[in-house]
Amino acid sequence: MHTKRRYLVITELFLPTKGGTAVWFDEVYRRLGGKEIHIVTADVSGAAAHDAEHPNSVHRVPLRRHRWLRPESLAMYLRLLREGLSLAWRHEFDAVHAGRVLPEGLIGWALARLWRIPLLVYAHGEEITTWRQPGKRRAMWFTYRHADRVIANSEFTRDELLALGVHPERLAVIHPGVDVERFQPGLPCAGLREQIGIGPGQKLILSVGRLSRRKGFDQVIRALPGLIEQGTDAHHVVVGTGQDKGYLETLADEMGVTERVHLLGHVPMDDLPRWYNAADVFAMPNRELDGDTEGFGMVFLEAAACAKSAIAGRAGGAGSAVVDGVTGIVVDGRSLAELTEALRRLCQDESLARTLGHNGYLRARRHFSWQQVAAKTLALDLTTEHPAYVEKGNQ
């Protein structure tokens, strides 16, 4: 990047916190500049070691919710505001970037208006479809509509923002990316299959993500008996942690496939790309549950970068990550029949799986490298002379 911007970035989610959103912000802003970019984020375990080698200026504050407060996140708002004010007094920023609409976006709006600089807010989709509390929704509505630019992570999220009344000219769709050097095909992986007892003739279905019901990992487990009946000797490996672990274990026992379901929890960073390589197909048949849906799904890009075909759910923004019939198969995540057939096709038709995986690999490298995501972010010129930054409508 040749053009440097002085950003104040406010985000609770930032490495070493686990999760795709934390990876997104860390990968992008390290590519947008050096110490002139200041990141205000949560103080978490392992932060000191991570920040010591980070190119940006990272400021850690304790961000905890307290049940006895109303609202519970009031202390978070105050700490973010105090740190943001301190930095804004000492540095001249070109813009404020907020990792989420609340609390970061609302704090960012206050700081941006005080210093008369633009505000950019990231939208992830889930917050729009799941937040029900009236006061929270009003604050979200206000912040999104008063931001000078909103980055939507998918076309689905963009449409949800339009429905909220955000002006189309203030919206930009920028998908998350993937480290195409870390995630790539050809990595050694034979030992991974052996350590969980998967033989050469058996199929490995991989799922990666938080153990949440909407991810559809339970549907993959339900599909295993049908696959076996149809002649597909398959195992299901799940990488991730979350509240559904016990539920998935119980379900595997009820379906009689306990020995074929491997819940690995968190795996070392170097091992994750190898697990993608070890898989025959990647599956996250996401579905909407009570408004909770997938905004995008960075794991689909990780699988694609490793040249693996993927099965995604039709709900939410997963369709932006997986192109149906080109890089994978998109199914109704609620339909066990659709999922079982998609798994059968990709497990039994190796030529099809290779073709879709290769297409995904080319797409990931051409359009989704973190360098490309950073370039698109930088291209959102939010200086006060930009047409998107006008006082009319922001008061």
Image (cartoon, rainbow, N blue to C red):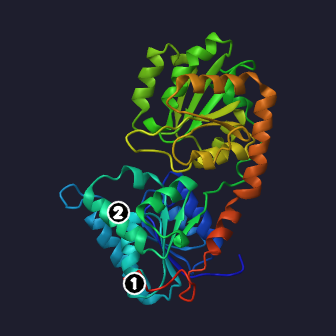
Q: Which mark is residue 113?
A: 1
The N terminus is located in which quarter? Answer: bottom right
Mark 2 secondary-structure assignment: loop
Q: Please state if 353 lies on the left or on the right of 196 as rendered.
A: right
Q: Please state if 372 lies on the left or on the right of 123 as rendered.
A: right
Residue 34 in picture, x, y percent from top left:
61, 77
Report which quarter residue 144 is drawn in: bottom left
Asked if 372 appears above or below 209 in the picture, the reply is below
Asked if 36 appears above or below 9 in the picture, the reply is below
Other-residue count near label 1 (Cα within 10 Å), few / some / many at <14 / 14–19 / ≥20 = some
Asked if 202 appears above or below 299 in the picture, the reply is above
Instruction: Give the residue displayed 63% in from the left and 74% down from the top.
Output: 378
Mark in the foreground, 2 or 1:
1
Which residue does the numbered mark 2 point to in the structure image? 63
Q: Please state if 323 lies on the left or on the right of 14 as rendered.
A: right
The type of residue carrying mark 1 is Arg
Looking at the picture, tell me which residue is in the foreground, 85 or 391: 391
Counting residues from the start of the chain, the first of labels 2 and 1 encountered is 2
Residue 137 in picture, x, y percent from top left:
32, 60
